[in-house]
Image (cartoon, helix red, strand yellow):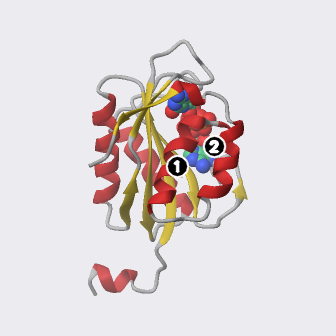
Amino acid sequence: MNDGDMQSNEAWERAYIGLGSNIGDRERFLTEAVHLLQEHPQIRVTGQSALYETDPVGYTDQAPFLNMAIEVTTTLSPEQLLEQLMETERLLGRVRDIRWGPRTIDLDMLMYGNVRQQQPELTLPHPRMHERAFVLIPLIEVLELHHQPQAEPLRAFLERAEGKEGVTLWKKMQ
Ligand SMILES: Nc1ncnc2c1ncn2[C@@H]1O[C@H](COP(=O)(O)OP(=O)(O)OP(=O)(O)O)[C@@H](O)[C@H]1O
Ligand SMILES: Nc1nc2c(c(=O)[nH]1)N=C(CO)CN2
């Protein structure tokens, strides 16, 4: 049995991931994270936003971030996908210390299909995404790539989100 046969009964679900980095070569950490996810046989990266430079939110005494969002399709469960996100953070050398503090790479699962769940290990949609312009701006962009209907309600959240003026387009995707 080859890999294709093993996966043939599993559905490919669409999920959205928010990425952020504010230490070292920020662009390289983001692009490396996308490549590492893309290499997983059960993950396909199907859309990427531009890179945005964003003022830090929460713990503000730290360097500006680069943020972006990606769309993936995956046969991994939400919990398995979270494990891959954490593994990718580990590979790229993230050290956890200050909450909301500096990091080489931070990967948040923003949405997974229509799953809604509230558990400390994994809350979906991500509990703080609706308040954060640095998440909403790239997320809405990537949703619009494939005309996903969730973009519309999120635009209403963006109207109310703080920190919009702290988000600037940094690099467009080719
Ligand atoms: N949707 C989610 N995506 C990623 N992690 C989540 C999610 N829901 C819950 N978690 C849990 O949150 C924990 C802490 O995550 P992390 O250290 O990345 O937080 P943070 O990036 O500092 O803050 P924030 O979650 O506000 O972005 C993780 O161990 C994970 O189990
Ligand atoms: N601009 C910006 N600010 C943040 C970010 C981030 O990715 N971008 N991540 C945080 C912890 O999740 C806290 N603050």
The N terminus lies in quadrant = bottom left
Q: Are marks 2 and 1 in contact (CB under 8 Å)?
A: yes
Q: At numbered mark 1, what does the secondary structure look like: helix, strand or loop? A: helix
Please name the residue shown 61% across and 27% down the image: 163
Q: At numbered mark 2, what does the secondary structure look like: helix, strand or loop? A: helix
Query: Mark 2, residues whose alpha carbon is within 10 Å: few (<14), some, or many (≥20)?
Result: many
Query: Mark 1, residues whose alpha carbon is within 10 Å: few (<14), some, or many (≥20)?
Result: many
Using the rendered image of the protein, determine whether residue 27 is visible from the camera's viewpoint: yes
> Of marks 2 and 1, which one's residue comes earlier in the chain?
2
Tag 1 residue = 139
| Lateral position of residue 163 relative to residue 50, left or right | right
Please name the residue shown 32% across and 61% down the image: 40
Using the rendered image of the protein, determine whether residue 124 is visible from the camera's viewpoint: no
Depth order, front residue of 148/103:
148
Which disc is residue 129 wearing? 2
Q: Which kind of residue does numbered mark 2 sit on? A: Met
Quarter holding ligand 2: top right
Which disc is residue 98 wearing? none
Name the mark nearer the viewer: 2 or 1.
1
